[in-house]
Amino acid sequence: MKGPGYHHALIKRGAFGEVSKIEEEFWEFMDALRQGVTVMQLVELSDMLGAIEGWLEKHHPSISLAHLIKMKDVTKRAFKNGHRGKERG
């Protein structure tokens, strides 16, 4: 098997704990999509979660991925129900 390493695209390295690392993992995910390698896509999504977790630890240490997942669930519920809250009447 010839060619580059994991990624075909040139992807700028980010700094852990910074937005640049989240961007790096996003572009690696996009490259994995272009390559059509499902396992690599899932690994890059996992790496993206790690980068998000590192950013939270540095910039919002009282917030965790669990907090973001809880908010994601609330948003999903709102979209499923078709409204943001109870109507006042």
Image (tube, grey):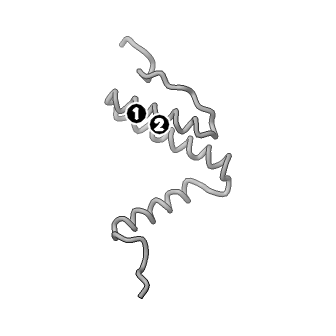
Q: In the displayed orientation, state which residue is furthest to the bottom.
A: 89
Q: In the displayed orientation, state which residue is furthest to the left.
A: 36
State the residue in front, 11 or 32: 11
For image coordinates 62% across by 36% down, the residue present is 16
Is the residue marked by circle 2 packed among few (<14), some (14-19), or many (20+) residues within 10 Å?
Answer: some
Q: Is residue 2 above or below residue 73?
A: above
Q: In the displayed orientation, state which residue is furthest to the top.
A: 2
- Judge left or right: residue 65 versus residue 6: right
Q: Is the Cβ of the residue at disc 1 closer than 8 Å to that at disc 2?
A: yes
Label 2 secondary element: helix
Please, what is the three-letter code of the amino acid marked with disc 1? Met
Please, what is the three-letter code of the amino acid marked with disc 2? Phe
Q: CA distance from mark 1 to mark 2?
A: 6 Å
Give the percent coordinates (x, y) of residue 12: 54, 26
Q: Which residue is mark 2?
A: 26
- Judge left or right: residue 57 versus residue 2: right
Q: Which residue is mark 1?
A: 30
State the residue in front, 57 or 84: 84
Q: Quadrant of residue 34?
A: top left
Is the residue marked by circle 1 packed among few (<14), some (14-19), or many (20+) residues within 10 Å?
Answer: some
Residue 69 tag number = none
Give the percent coordinates (x, y) of residue 7: 43, 23
